[in-house]
Image (cartoon, rainbow, N blue to C red):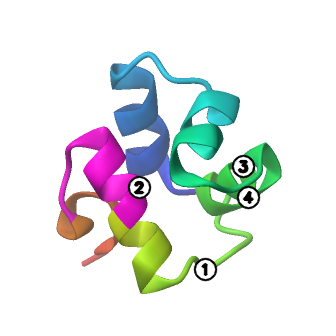
Amino acid sequence: MNEALKQARLAKNLSQTELAKRIGVSRQTVNMIENSAYNPTVGLCIKICKELGVTLNDLFWKE
């Protein structure tokens, strides 16, 4: 599970639906990314990060 994405989304008081609308995807896509069932493109990752005000490393880099 991508807990960092979920926490960043919740910190901005955004539902999956609202985040999806803002980045131009379906709510199901956001749900699948949060549940690690879908690997988004770099372009989509950048849109998510810009919308949430975080970096790629914050959300998608796992050590």
Q: Residue furthest top?
A: 13
The answer to whether the residue labelled 3 contacts the one labelled 1, judged by CB atoms less than 8 Å apart, is no
Q: Range of the magenta residues? A: 47-55
SS of the residue under disc 1: loop
Badge 3: residue crowd in 10 Å (few <14, some 14–19, many ≥20): some
Distance from disc 3 to disc 4, alpha carbons, whole Å, reads 5 Å
Front position among marks 4 and 1: 4
Q: Position of residue 63 (x, y in %)?
A: 24, 78
Which residue matches tag 1?
39
Front position among marks 3 and 4: 4
Q: Residue furthest right?
A: 28
Front position among marks 3 and 2: 2
Q: Amino acid type of disc 1?
A: Asn
The answer to whether the residue labelled 2 contacts the one labelled 4, judged by CB atoms less than 8 Å apart, is no
Which residue matches tag 4?
29
Distance from disc 2 to disc 4, alpha carbons, whole Å, reads 12 Å
The answer to whether the residue labelled 2 contacts the one labelled 1, judged by CB atoms less than 8 Å apart, is no
Distance from disc 3 to disc 1, alpha carbons, whole Å, reads 12 Å
SS of the residue under disc 4: helix
